[in-house]
Amino acid sequence: MISQQEFERIVVYMKRKSGINLSDKKVLIQGRLDNYMQRNGYKSYNEFMDIVEKYPTGPEAETLMNTLTTNHTYFWREYEQFLYLKKSVFPELKERTQNTHDWRIWCAASSSGEEPYTLAMLCMDYLGLEHNKWDTKILATDIDTSVLEKAVKGIYSKDSVENLPEHYVRRFFKQINDKQ
């Protein structure tokens, strides 16, 4: 069982390190960390946090961050926002970078990659036949290293692309097997 002091220690750490506010997530923290704590022989959350704070770039700190972040994502997530980008932001961006043909886009909280890949497809679709003349780069980041590994691989289930327009699926995806 996590004590109030241990809970607050984790909340403060996560807020300081990631900006994530877990102040009303005691059940979530305990639920996600309990099995890990038991499997790895920790007698208390304070013992675990001592290691996390002593080695802030170590495996326990990474485990804490990966365990307490929520990775809810899918292709075309927040569809209206992507439409807004295509209709309002991209035209202005294109005009402002007409001389350089240079787009740099940062997709924070990228999780397993569905959102930055959607963004890349949208950029190519918007630029059309001219896309080869443009140097577009998308930086996809996330504090959860385990989901970034999936993003780098770029392998998704067939179900995960069902919300994408069919022409995007045909153009940007290659079928691996019956499920991927």
Image (tube, rainbow, N blue to C red):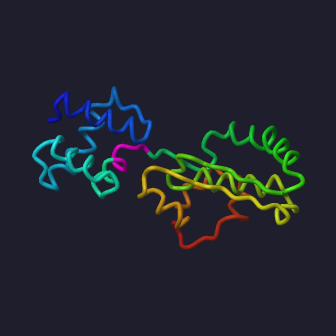
Is 81 in front, or is 104? Answer: 104
Total number of numbered discs in the rendering: 0
**Which residue is found at the position 14% from the left and 36% from the top?**
1
Decide if residue 150 is on the left or right side of residue 52.
right
Which image quarter: residue 120? bottom right
Q: Residue 60 placed where, x, y %?
A: 27, 54
Instruction: Judge by depth and name the residue closer to the eye, 179 or 120.
Output: 120
Residue occupying image coordinates x 54% and y 52%: 141
Residue shown at the point (64%, 70%) measured from the top left: 174
Name the side, left or right, on which 25 lies relative to 179. Answer: left
Q: Position of residue 101 (x, y in %)?
A: 84, 57
State the image coordinates of residue 71 (x, y, percent, origin top left): 45, 46
122 part of magenta stretch? no
Quarter of the view holding residue 33: top left
Q: Give the farthest residue toward the left.
A: 43
Q: Is residue 67 magenta?
A: yes
Question: Which residue occupies 56% across, 46% down?
Answer: 108
Reply above or below: 9 against 107.
above
Q: Position of residue 153 (x, y in %)?
A: 52, 67
| Residue 145 shown left or right of residue 178 in the figure | left
The magenta stretch spans which residues? 65-70
